[in-house]
Amino acid sequence: MGRPMALNLARAGVPLVVWNRTPARCEPLRAAGASVAADPAEVFDRCRTVLLMLADGAAIDAVLGRGTPGFAARVAGRVIVHMGTTSPEYSRELAADIRAAGGGYAEAPVSGSRVPAEQGRLVAMLAGDEGAVAAVRPLLAPMCHEVFVCGAVPEALLTKLAVNIFLITTVTGLVEAFHFAERHGLDLDRFLAVVDAGPMASGVSRMKAPKLKDHDFAVQAGVWDVLKNNELIASAARRAAVASPLLDVCHALFAQTARLGHGGEDMVAVLRAVEARTRAEGEARGEPRDEPRDPAPTGARGEEPAESRAATGTVAS
């Protein structure tokens, strides 16, 4: 996510200093006019606003030097913007530490996967110090077609988690519907056209339905990432004593998908877990293992290597 987001900033003329723990990933940014830093320290030395698009709290802490004597020097006088997805509690504690060290802080998680990131069509949820929010909002425009100011930390991350409940359950529902249609031998083009013409059609269905029809599991949003988000949401729900019944079912299906060896594929690969359950149902009834009467054409099955789910690009302006 970090690389296409940074490319959109560079193309918009925003001066950038960038770093990624895999140097080769910075080359397209260098070609677009960004300056490539040798290490995170150089980014903080040269910049006053630092955007972090990192995999998790451990990666963020490592880049910031949190818990070390160098932390205060890195964040003091700077605005630090956390754009990934972590627990709300982590963001709240990070904000307190950065403020105590003399820095400003904002969280700006985004909704969208790789394709919207490439198109500059992400949706940002922004929360934090008033001054930090004012400084950060213009920088989000080249990456996002909508920015929603959510109030204080961690309201933006809580909003992102709520949105992800809808995303995860929606895609899982689409997959189950597709599996039902496929197993009944329906014309899949007609089925998907009906979905697209009806009230359930959305940007998500239009992006994921063709992948299902072609059995294309190349990653846009990966199974491992869905599991990570699902666990963050479930943890936040438990802390607040909030029921999450649909999410719990989805978690079981995505965990099964990963156990079946499809964790590095797109989230529509949850189809594999649904198919496995269909086979188990048939075997429990003593029925022979059958195949769809009108199987979908075979397309790409994840041959392309997925982006690392621990991508650690740091973009600063």
Image: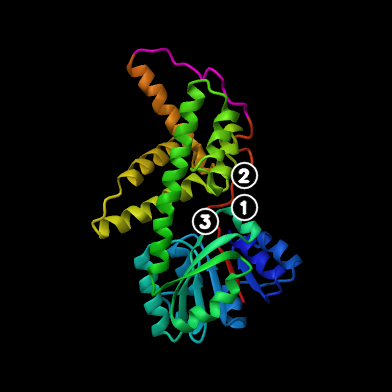
Count of labels in the image: 3
| Amino acid at the residue labelled 1 | Val
- Please give the name of the residue rendered at 55% of the width and 65% of the height, measured from the top-left corner: 146
**Front one among 196 and 133:** 196
Q: Helix, strand, or loop for circle 1? A: helix
Q: CA distance from mark 2 to mark 3?
A: 14 Å
Q: Secondary structure at mark 2?
A: loop
Residue assigned mark 3: 310
Q: Quadrant of residue 254?
A: top left
Q: Is residue 145 magenta?
A: no
Numbered disc in front, either 1 or 2: 1
According to the image, label 2 marks what residue? 305
- Give how far apart the Cα atoms at labels 3 and 1 are: 18 Å
Q: Is residue 297 magenta?
A: yes
Q: Position of residue 98 (x, y in %)?
A: 42, 80
Please state, as top left, top right, bottom left or bottom right, where the C terminus lies in the image: bottom right
Numbered range of the magenta stretch: 286-298
Quote the CA–CA distance across marks 1 and 2: 16 Å
Q: What amino acid is at disc 2? A: Pro
Report whether 182 appears left or right of 157: right
Residue displayed at 51% across by 25% down: 182
> Of circles 3 and 1, which is in front?
1
The residue under label 1 is 115
Residue at position x 39%, y 38% in the image: 253
Secondary structure, mark 3, is loop
Answer above or below: position of 37 versus 234. Answer: below
Is 275 left, or right, of 46 in this rendering? left
